[in-house]
Image (cartoon, helix red, strand yellow):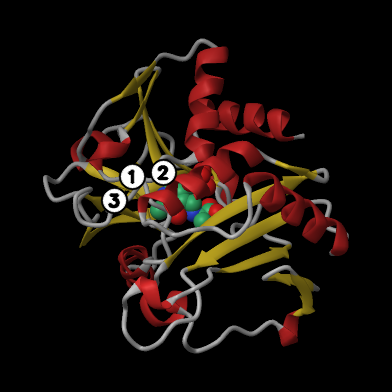
Amino acid sequence: QWIYLNGEYVAKHEAKISVFDHGFLYGDGIFEGIRIYNGNIFKCKEHLDRLYDSAKSIMLDIPLSYSEMERALIETIRKNGMNDGYIRLVVSRGDGNLGLDPRRCPKANVVIIVEQLAIYPPEAYVNGLKSVSVSTRRNIPDALNPKIKSLNYLNNILVKIQANLAGAGEAIMLNAQGYVAEGSSDNIFIVKNGVVFTPPCYVGALEGITRGAILEICGKIGLPVRIEPFTLHDVYVADEVFFTGTAAEVIATCEVDGRVIGSGKAGPITTRLLEEFRKIVE
Ligand code: PDD
């Protein structure tokens, strides 16, 4: 397995960064999770646009142009002979000193890892995941804006820890006002009376690319969509609930905080959307 590290390809066990990297020291950096289907990078432009937006927002200067980054992705996939897999693209502020001042980091570090990935077994897409709501709140947009896909993932990790402690497969994060924001590393949708709902990102969600693809599919197949805030009550009484993400794809949740959702398995609209999603990625 070859890792792209600052323009060089190094073997997996050789791929090391300095302990003075500010991504390591402070979580100062950004990343993308991208899928490869049939040798193609799914939604490459959308992912790189989001990466460069995240970089701009935290004033991190990525030392590769958009096209150089795209070429690095393609080359890393080719070098690893990857046809279906997952790309983790990480750009940290770079090596500096112990101070947190980014001006001490002359050059960002760029890492590209490609791996096989199946975060849920096939049956989970039929049976759905058990989910819980957690007390860890989504950081509100004027703190660290959730639209920035930063390496500051402790908020998400604390949510995942609470899901683990509850023996649940996924967790639902609320924002400070108590509105449903998203999952630990995926966006959330509910279906009620044939209408598909998902929170607007300002509630405290990453503008998910899979979320965008699902919204497009809803439009294409004539499913009414409402992008508006909703609460846990709306989740509990929904006919269907599902999460979307590059790693997760489209995964139903069959129970939230002990409330069985709909039939207790992936619902008809969730199943249809997953089928349509699989068609567009092939
Ligand atoms: N997650 N929200 C959060 C907090 C995420 O980390 C992710 C992606 C999403 C889904 O966004 P997208 O559809 O663009 O992947 C939402 C990991 C990194 C992943 O799924 O790769």
**Disc 2 residue: CB within 8 Å of ligand 1:** yes
Residue neighbourhood size for the residue with mark 2, other residues' Cα within 10 Å, grouped as few (<14), some (14–19), many (≥20)? many
**Disc 1 residue: CB within 8 Å of ligand 1:** yes
Q: Kindly identify which numbered label has been placed on residue 149.
A: none
Q: Determine whether label 1 and label 2 are within 8 Å by CB.
A: yes
- Left or right relative to 189: residue 218: right
**Residue 197 screen position, x and y as percent:** 35, 27
Quarter holding the N terminus?
A: bottom right
**Residue 239 versus residue 81: which sits nearer the camera?**
81
Secondary structure at numbered mark 3: loop
Which of the two discs, 3 and 2, labels the residue nearer the N terminus? Answer: 3
**Residue 43 versus residue 277: which sits nearer the camera?**
43
Q: Residue at x 63, y 56 (%)?
A: 64
- Between tags 3 and 2, which lies in front? 3
**Residue 123 screen position, x and y as percent:** 62, 51
Q: Residue at x 78, y 60 (%)?
A: 76
Residue beneath label 1, please? Answer: 205
Mark 1–mark 2 Cα distance, whole angstroms, equals: 7 Å
Residue neighbourhood size for the residue with mark 3, other residues' Cα within 10 Å, grouped as few (<14), some (14–19), many (≥20)? some
Mark 1–mark 3 Cα distance, whole angstroms, equals: 9 Å
Q: Is residue 164 above or below residue 147?
A: below
- Between tags 1 and 3, which lies in front? 3
Which of the two discs, 1 and 3, labels the residue nearer the N terminus? Answer: 3
Q: Quadrant of residue 273?
A: top right
Which of the two discs, 1 and 2, labels the residue nearer the N terminus? Answer: 2
Residue beneath label 2, please? Answer: 187
Q: Can the viewer see residue 28 in this picture?
A: yes
Q: Is residue 61 above or below residue 269?
A: below
Q: Quadrant of residue 238?
A: top left
Q: Determine whether label 1 and label 3 are within 8 Å by CB.
A: no
Secondary structure at numbered mark 1: loop
Q: Can the viewer see residue 251 in this picture?
A: no
